[in-house]
Amino acid sequence: MKPHAGIRVTTLLLAAAAMMVIAWLLLRLLSSGGSAVPDPGWIGGVAMLFLGAALLIGGWQVRKVRDGHPNPVITPLRAARTLVLGQAGALTGSVLVGWYVANVLVLLPDADVDSQLARIWAFAVHAVIALLLAVAGMVVQSWCRLRPRDDEDENGSDHS
């Protein structure tokens, strides 16, 4: 039986692209009706950075146990939860990248206005931070992946 490969980069790219298209359409509809594109709050960027750092810390602990450094705090259940959190962080980051890029695209025609240019840069910074969250999630997923055991290969335990 082939183990599950986990979240793939193509999945993240598709999620980001889908969110970007949907958000762009909705934001264009709202802005054509006279509504302004909402400003990105700084708290969102801080929250994404905090989540990414927490994911990396948890993933690093699981990686150390996986590599043979015992830690009684890291149980198999905690390792599994860390894996799922890493995957959730990757998906969340990719969807947020799509959201922030859509905001940039909606504001881009008014980039010659200084106030709009400042907002474009704020959304671009948030998109980069969201990308970092997605990357952190993928790194944690790779750190939580179990390596195949040597005895499985020798016994020919191919269950296909």
Image (cartoon, rainbow, N blue to C red):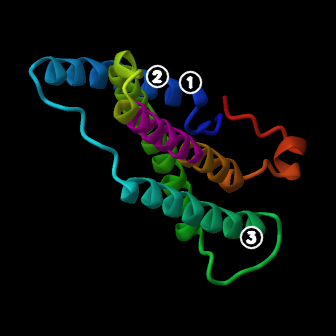
Tell me which numbered mark, 3 or 1, is placed earlier along the sequence: 1
To which residue does mark 2 refer? 14
Residue placed most toward the observer, 142 or 93: 93
Q: Where residue 159 sits in the image (x, y, percent)?
A: 68, 34
The quarter of the picture where the N terminus appears is top right
- Vertical comparison of 32 with 150: above or below: above
Which residue of the protein is positioned furthest toward the bottom in this rendering? 72
Q: Secondary structure at mark 3?
A: helix
Residue 150 percent across, percent down from the top left: 88, 50
Q: State the SS at label 1.
A: helix
Q: Is residue 159 above or below residue 140?
A: above
Circles 1 and 2 in contact, beta carbons < 8 Å: yes
* Boundaries of the magenta span: 117-132
Q: Please determine whether, in this image, residue 141 is positioned above or below residue 33.
A: below
Disc 3 marks which amino acid? Val
Q: Say what amino acid the circle numbered 2 marks.
A: Leu
Give the residue at x 81% y 75%. Answer: 69
Disc 3 and disc 1 in contact, CB within 8 angstroms:
no
Q: Percent x, y for residue 158? A: 74, 34
The residue under the point 38% across, 37% down is 119
Q: Which residue is mark 3?
A: 65
* Residue 24, x across and y down, in percent: 30, 21
> Looking at the rendering, which quadrant does residue 73 occupy?
bottom right
Tell us which disc is closer to us: 2 or 3. 2
Residue shown at 55% from the left, 57% from the top: 52
- The alpha-carbon separation of the residues under discs 1 and 2 comes to 6 Å
